[in-house]
Amino acid sequence: MIRAEGLVKTFGDFTAVDGIDVEVRPGEAFGFLGPNGAGKSSTMRMIGCVSPPSAGTLEILGMDARTQGAQIRARLGVVPQKDTLDEELTVEENIWVYGRYFGLSRRLVRERAEELLDFAQLTGRAKSVVEPLSGGMKRRLTIARALVNSPSVLLLDEPTTGLDPQARHVLWDRLFRLKREGVTLVLTTHYMDEAEQLCDRLVVMDQGRVVAEGSPRSLIEQHSTREVLELRFDVADHQPVAEKVHGVAERVEVLPDRLLLYTADGESAQAEVTRRGLDPLSALVRRSTLEDVFLHLTGRTLVD
Amino acid sequence: MTDGRVGAGRAGMLVERNYRSSRRTWPVIVSGFFEPVFFLFAMGVGIGTLVGDVELADGTAVPYVVFVAPALLAASAMNGAVFDSTINVFFKLKYARLYDSVLATPLGPRDVAVAEIGWALLRGVVYSTAFLLVAALAGAVTSPWALLAVPAATLIGWAFASLGMAATTYMRTWADFDYVNLAILPMFLFSATFFPLQTYPPALQGVVQATPLYHGVAMVRELMLGRVGPGLLVHVAVLAALGVLGTWWTARRIEGLLLR
């Protein structure tokens, strides 16, 4: 579906994407995970053929992104980071007009709009103008609009950023449905739960590079331990406490408000902490998540 | 001309979009008709009674309203085109971010340029036709050649809409539009619009003749007075060249701004 080799994007002196290799397979949900500024959006813009690659090769649906942009865009659906709905038009007109940009007939866009508004749970708002819709509704309309040309690949740049938890779940549900229908999803996110929920495979990006690649499960297995012990102490700085738990776990990460102890067995580690006479305010044993992977790979938490 | 990177030849779809959105803002569109009509009655009919006849370069004299009506048609074609292609386009470019979503489809930057300029021209055709009717009722139309004033006004609109849109791509804030007024207002007043070229000091006549609006005014005036000659082709060529330049330039700028 999508194949990038040594893909680079520079803006003057600034290198946004620094030579990444990515392959997206048909029908999968593929994620770009990383903090703001990691190069996710620049990569998505190149895949969307609205930003020419500075170097490397980028092939989408068997075509060259540099020279066949219009043909590629005809088969993509794009959900940009910020909604770019046409606020001068109504909900249904947004879909009609967008479909017309793809050269679909007036009759066809009306049919598609009806199906898509149903899919986006917006049928009741079809005649409404866009402006008063809630954030979640606008997002769903943006997705519905992106589907008007029945795209082979749907690109979603931070699809749920800024939405409340309920709206996020509604959106995820819609994306699952699309995936089951065979649409290839490519999305960026800086939420681990979103990546774990939606993505079959993902790459972790940091500073324009791919630092890890795989399924959420395999990334956790490769780059983290089975369990994590989280300890909070009643101190301003957790760094000195970290020295006292040295050797208790395979690895210790110091966060401003807590310590993370990476170990196969959280319970024993906790017992060892107690045996050393330490008295944390709270101690929690949990499974490793993608956030731990990210923390390990980049030394930073993901949500900034 | 079918380079897929700059355009998909589907500018018409964006024109359709503008038509759809304009149906909700038709009072704004209708208001565009009144400006030149008010000018026609204030300047042509009102001041015209004080001025009497105007002597043309060839020595013949015509009533002031007959002299000034073609200039008002040309100037309003300019004003309308500039308004549509600057303020409206700036809003869509910077605030509504309309073209970001358009360029994610097969449409390219040239489609955007052609569509927005074309839309300004379509509105212009309606305005200039309506103005011509009012001018005829006011007794300011004296030759059947005046019918060609509508396509002529459209040509003026093309030159100014395309240059206006190109200039808009350089605008950073609304305050920058003062520069547009700075260029438009003197042209409106001093392109042999309200008084004939030979009344200007000889040194300034060359300056006047170098402005695009002068060519527009002269072209429409020659048509409406029925003085059709090969000189018309010069005006047509100048305005068409500006239209081509402005359209090409706009497409380049849209590409540079949005397809980085």
Image (cartoon, rainbow, N blue to C red):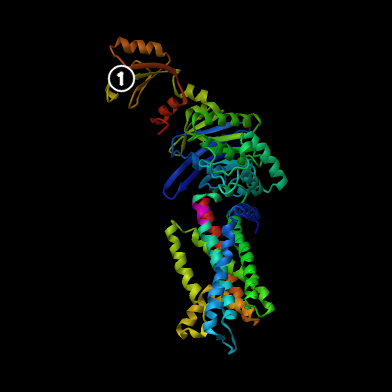
Outermost bottom residue: B59
* Identity of the residue drawn at 50% across and 41% down: A41
Tell me the quadrant of the picture where the N terminus of chain B can be found.
bottom right
Q: Secondary structure at mark 1?
A: loop
* Identity of the residue drawn at 49% across and 39% down: A40
Whether residue A224 is visible, yes or no, is yes
Residue B79's x, y, as percent? 53, 67
Outermost right residue: A107
Specify whether A130 is left or right of A18.
Answer: right
Chain of the residue under label 1: A
Question: Which residue is identified by label 1?
Answer: A233
Count of labels in the image: 1
The reply to whether the magenta stretch includes residue A232 is no
- What amino acid is labelled 1 in the image? Phe
Whether residue A105 is visible, yes or no, is no
Specify whether B11 is left or right of A235.
Answer: right
Residue B121's x, y, as percent? 61, 63
* Identity of the residue drawn at 69% across and 44% down: A109
Residue A275's x, y, as percent? 31, 9
The answer to which of A21 and B89 lies nearer the viewer is: B89
Specify whether A36 is left or right of B247.
Answer: left
The boundaries of the magenta stretch are B89-94
The answer to which of A249 and B147 lies nearer the viewer is: B147
Residue A5's x, y, as percent? 54, 40
The answer to which of B189 and B216 lies nearer the viewer is: B189
